[in-house]
Image (cartoon, helix red, strand yellow):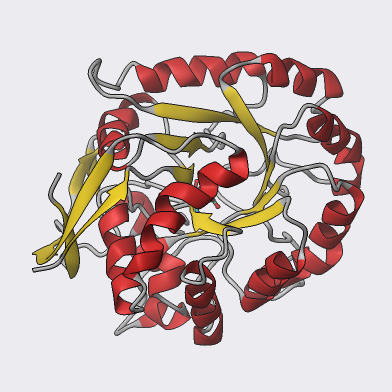
């Protein structure tokens, strides 16, 4: 039996949701991670300091007293976000970054940004206050093929943002294409990317195995195998520009198994075990700890976590479902076996 010990991981992109959903999401998040970047796309977006701080306290109310866990809060950028809001956010010890959703690209992004160019004064204020910019990098142009929306976003927008704001830390989140990998590799040190477990483990074939698979649907959507391979290579390359970000995005079973199902894959039940499984399959277990526990902290200039976790090579079966809201949720890899298990 093989065993590895790694520094307690962080998750640099996830969705914790709100209200009674927190009774499911927080116990799982706190078992897997010490710090998580909490996405602001609640039904009413978290777009000012008061809302972000109130959300922080609602999350913390579910964290047991003896557990150390830090949600890093984000502000949802809108067309009417003002430089004053950014300056105010920079003074809050709880607010960590700002999130850019081009309007309409994903769950609860309708209130996102319509005109990116008009946000440039906001980016300037963020750079001045050293607030990182987290980007959902897809265009929402219905004339653009859904599989091309990340690449087109790079060409139309991201390239220019990176060029115009050399002092702004930018994270290209949940990247899904070789184009994104190449763009991040060719960019400055202020540009990094997160990679999800689903985009490492699967390509778009997984959406159609024996029928339509709603639980493999997330945004940005899974891409071709050549893109999956580029993501695996980036994740195991040891390049500090690429680090963990699960994009764990819970939706109740009935919302997924529907005529118009929600985008999002829930992975916080076993995220670290799944990444370990993936890195092992790629013969790169020695690269796991940097990816899950160092490179993100380095990018954000945060200290490493002190505690460690132990993972053991031992097959186990992921549960079929977990209770969620007043029904259930189907976790990523439900009823599947994976080879790594957390033992402490
Ligand atoms: C996320 C969600 O459900 O909030 N969904 C997803 O498919 N990843 C939003 C997002 O990060 O795009
Ligand atoms: Zn997300």
Along the horizontal axis of the image, is 174 left or right of 310?
right
Q: Quadrant of residue 33?
A: top left
Point 82% across, 68% down: residue: 155
In the rendered view of the protein, which quadrant contains the C terminus?
A: top left
Q: In this rendering, is residue 279 above or below 84?
A: below
Q: Position of residue 176 (x, y in %)?
A: 57, 69
Residue 146 percent across, percent down from the top left: 64, 72
| Left or right: where 73 falls relative to 138 | left
Q: Can the viewer see residue 16 in this picture?
A: no
Dividing the image into 4 quarters, which one contains the N terminus?
Answer: bottom left
Residue nearest the viewer, comparing 269 with 304 = 304
Decide which of 28, 41 is in the foreground and name it.
28
Relative image position of residue 285 (x, y in whole percent):
32, 68
Tell me if residue 319 comes above or below residue 96 in the rendering. Answer: below
**For residue 156, side relative to residue 173 (left or right):** right
Residue 334 higher or lower than 322, as above or below: below
Instruction: Specify whether residue 47 is in view.
Output: yes
Nearer to me, 342 or 304: 304
Give the quarter of the image for residue 36. Answer: top left
Please tell me which residue is depicted at 54% across the width and 60% down the height of the picture.
219
The x, y position of residue 289, in whole percent, is 38, 56
Residue 205 horizontal side relative to residue 324, left or right: right
């Amino acid at each position: 039996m093989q065993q590895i010990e790694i520094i307690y991981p962080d998750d640099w992109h996830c969705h914790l949701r709100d209200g009674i959903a927190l009774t499911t999401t927080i116990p799982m998040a706190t078992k897997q991670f010490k710090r998580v970047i909490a996405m602001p796309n609640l039904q009413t977006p978290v777009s000012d300091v008061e809302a972000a701080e109130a959300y922080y306290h609602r999350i913390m109310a579910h964290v047991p007293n003896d557990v150390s866990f830090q949600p890093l809060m984000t502000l949802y950028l809108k067309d009417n976000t003002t430089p004053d809001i950014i300056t105010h956010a920079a003074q809050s010890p709880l607010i960590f970054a700002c999130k850019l959703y081009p309007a309409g690209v994903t769950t609860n992004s309708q209130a996102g940004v319509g005109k990116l160019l008009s946000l440039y004064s906001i980016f300037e204020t963020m750079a001045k206050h050293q607030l990182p910019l987290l980007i959902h990098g897809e265009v929402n142009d219905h004339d653009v093929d859904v599989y091309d929306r990340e690449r087109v976003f790079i060409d139309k927008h991201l390239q220019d943002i990176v060029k115009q704001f050399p002092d702004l830390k930018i994270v290209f989140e949940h990247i899904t294409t070789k184009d994104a990998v190449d763009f991040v590799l060719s960019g400055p040190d202020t540009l990094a990317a997160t990679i999800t477990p689903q985009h490492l483990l699967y390509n778009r074939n997984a959406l159609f195995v024996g029928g339509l698979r709603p639980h493999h649907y997330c945004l940005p959507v899974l891409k071709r195998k050549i893109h999956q391979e580029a993501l695996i290579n980036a994740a195991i390359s040891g390049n500090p520009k690429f680090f963990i970000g699960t994009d764990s995005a819970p939706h109740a079973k009935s919302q997924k198994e529907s005529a118009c199902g929600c985008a999002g894959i829930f992975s916080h039940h076993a995220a670290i075990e799944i990444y370990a499984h993936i890195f092992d399959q790629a013969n790169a277990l020695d690269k796991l700890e940097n990816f899950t526990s160092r490179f993100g902290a380095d990018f954000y200039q945060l200290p490493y976590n002190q505690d460690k976790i132990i993972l053991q090579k031992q097959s186990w079966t992921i549960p079929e479902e977990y209770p969620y809201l007043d029904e259930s949720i189907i976790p990523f890899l439900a009823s599947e076996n994976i080879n790594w298990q957390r033992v402490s």
